Image (cartoon, grey):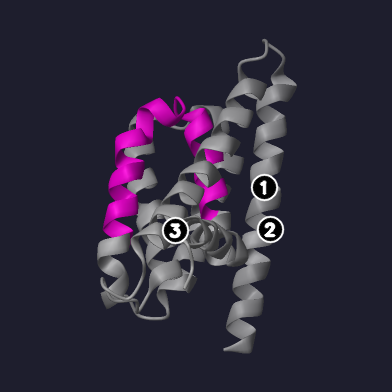
Amino acid sequence: MDTPMQAVLSGAAALAAYPETGLPLIALGLWLAFCGGIARGGIALVAGLGAGILLAPFAPGAVSVLSLVAGTLVAAGTALIGPRLPGRAGPPIAALTTTMALASLLHGQGFDSLPVAFVAGVMGAALLAVILPSTLAGVVLRGGGAAWRALAVRIAASWLTAILVLVIAFGLRSA
């Protein structure tokens, strides 16, 4: 039997082990950096976590591909539009992306099948997976008036888009 701390760490490790969960959340963090940061989409982010957990028992296995597609669209939007992203787009994108990511990680799990500490570890790691890239990109963006700062974040988003497309391709090839 795992201790609560081991269950929390197992939940955090589960999020890191599956790219269909972690990569879309990192893309969301970059998106939110251009939309005003976590303060703009924080409530929607937490609502998306809850919705993902509630939808997970009913989600089909294909939700992992939908999560990757959502992450690809978010990363590509960040790379292509960047500083022109509308601030109002942050909360709905945060809720949708987070819902898909959590549902893909926990799909098929009943409400009583996972320990609360495991789910808490997943939720904590998911929040960190969004907050850390958003904060780092926000620091880069607000560091001064140089045009290269926004370009650097957009380049990171374009690389993330490429990685997500490759993960989708390999996932569909093996299916």
Q: Name the residue under label 2.
A: 162
Does 125 lie within the magenta span? no
Expressed as whole percent of the image width and height from the top left, the position of residue 28 reads 49, 45
- Vertical arrangement, residue 131 with respect to residue 39, above or below: below
Q: Nearer the viewer, residue 13 or 80?
A: 13
Q: Which mark is residue 158?
A: 1
Q: Nearer the viewer, residue 79 or 17?
A: 17
Expressed as whole percent of the image width and height from the top left, the position of residue 12 reads 53, 56
Q: Residue at position x 65%, y 26% from top?
A: 150
Give me the C-alpha separation between circle 1 and circle 2.
6 Å
Q: Residue at position x 58%, y 56% from top?
A: 23
Q: Name the residue under label 3.
A: 4
SS at mark 1? Answer: helix
Q: Which of 99 and 115 is in front in this view?
A: 115
Magenta extent: 24-52
Residue 52 visible in the displayed image:
yes
Q: What residue type is labelled 3?
A: Pro
Q: Residue at position x 59%, y 71% from top?
A: 168
Which callout, 1 or 3, points at the residue further toward the start of the chain?
3
SS at mark 2? Answer: helix
- Vertical arrangement, residue 84 with respect to residue 100, above or below: above
